[in-house]
Amino acid sequence: MSQKTAPRTLPRLLQAPAVISLLLWMIVPLVMTIYFSTIRFNLMQPDNTGFIGLENYEYFITDPSFWPAVLNTMLLLGWVIVITVVLGLFLGLITDAPFPGRGIARVLLISPFFVMPTVNALLWKHMMMNPVYGVLAQVWIFFGAEPVNWLTDYPLFSIILIVSWQWLPFAALIFITALQSMDREQLEAARMDGATYLQQLRYLYIPHLSRPIAVVVMIEMIFLLSVFAEIFTTTQGGPSDASTNVTFLIFKQALLDFDFGVASAGALFAVIIANIAAVFLIRMVGKNLD
Amino acid sequence: MRHHRPTYTPAMILRTLVAWSVTLFLFFPLGWMALTAFKTELQAIAVPPLVLFEPTLENFTIVQERSDYMHYALNSLITSIGSTILGLAIAAPAAYAMAFYPSKATKDVLMWMLSTKMMPAVGALMPIYVLAQSSNMLDSLTALVIIFTLANLPIMVWMLYAGFKDIPKEILDAARMDGATLWQEARMVLLPLAIGTIASTGLLCLVLSWNEAFWSLTLTAAKAGTLAALIAQYSSPEGLFWAKLSAASLMAIAPIVVFGWFSQKQLVQGLTFGAVK
């Protein structure tokens, strides 16, 4: 291989498999989804086909489950982000300074994030939230209260709790990592000058953490729009639509009702929402590349 | 930041107490599950809950016998290791080219790769299902390996790129001057220098693939089901099953949680695409 051609063709050749496979992974499903969304396409009625324009979109948006699903998606997203960011900051700050057993405590704290979602969801569904034998029911009885049937009476709240428990370690881990790059001398100086802890928080910690907070919010936005396994294994979106989010609604229309046309219209809707969140994240990461 | 032993002031003791109470509170569900795995089914639903009991290993054998745990574990191993190796094989050359022969387009290509990770999986569900069905790959390990690889590829390229970029290009140039072929250069110069980056990238992908649930729940059944799918079967079984569920869950998560502990830093870098270091 000659020195002159190597720097031009070889790098392209080496990048080709990654670029081509990701291009296919992006374009093929997208084009197919757009196509499916404009035709009549029900796996149960293979003979009933044909171009129907925007009918699937109309059907998806006027489905009585649509607005509840959108609202649930937003509530799930909003609450989990608030809970994980606030508690994550608390955990990050509280484990920032050394204390006996800090290493072990941190390992225990971040463990739930490495637990697969189906295990996480069933652990909560059965052992924690069971209204008769569950740990929470026992605690309620201990304090003389009536045990709560969490997944039936407060389905969305229960899902929020389960998902928050899984994502809190992620937020905490990001904040712990970010805090390690704090300017210790500046902190020390502030302490010497008699800054209270609240002042340190306000003027040193929070400004330093603003960027990690933004990153956590945006990454959680992208992942939490697609919460699926936690709903699939606990409430199946119910009772009625009480804990159905957009992802689960699309899954229901595709693999339970077998209406691929309507599900595809819904999928494009989900892609558009995700892209709105993605644009901001990509801009932010892009600045970091220079 | 361990310059000196911490001094035990009242504030310090208070902080230690608060930190440990919060930690144990948040870890409790997992700890409780681990404990339940060693109980009998009757002990598992005892009221009030049992903390002290004689541990039994029977749940682990029952889980293996009744639901063929090893079959699902093997599927999880094959899909996560397979997609990690395939992913590294595709991502490493790309990252090498981008790190050592950057062009004007490199940054755009990286950003575009990142954007493919932002696509919600459900957006591709219908096409992937139809493609898998028409190529006879529903409930097949091959389909899962390919999907896991593609889903992780952007993260892998990014992590490898970030690691390779820190290696001085002069070292590679020197090897080439001495007449090393590309393969020799990669194997004898780059690999020893980048082994840490490659290992941590692989580890993160192993964790992500092992825990993946969307595609394994929608595309697999009895044949290619992974552990995530096996556990989902316990969603509404009959009779007493908490101890067995706990045993199956513990076996499904223990190896990967330990891996996770070791890959914390990479996880932060990989999942935030280097925005937080």
Image: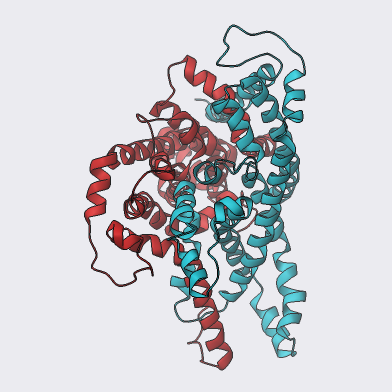
Which residue lies at the image location 38% right of the left edge and 68% below the top edge?
Answer: B49
Given residues A5 and B273, the one toward you in this image is B273
| Residue A87 place in picture, x, y as percent | 63, 67
Vertical order, B197 against A112 (above or below): above
Instruction: Look at chain B in the picture and name its colour.
Output: red
Which residue lies at the image location 73% right of the left edge and 24% below the top edge?
Answer: A59
Quadrant housing residue A185: bottom right
Quadrant housing residue A170: bottom right
Residue B181 appearing in the image? no
| Residue B98 place in picture, x, y as percent | 59, 38
Residue A142 appearing in the image? yes
Which residue lies at the image location 43% right of the left edge and 71% below the top edge?
Answer: A104
Given residues B202 and A101, the one toward you in this image is A101
Which residue lies at the image location 57% right of the left edge and 31% below the top edge?
Answer: A11
Q: Is residue A207 left or right of residue B156?
A: right
Rendered cyan, the chain in question is A
Given residues A272 and A77, the one toward you in this image is A77
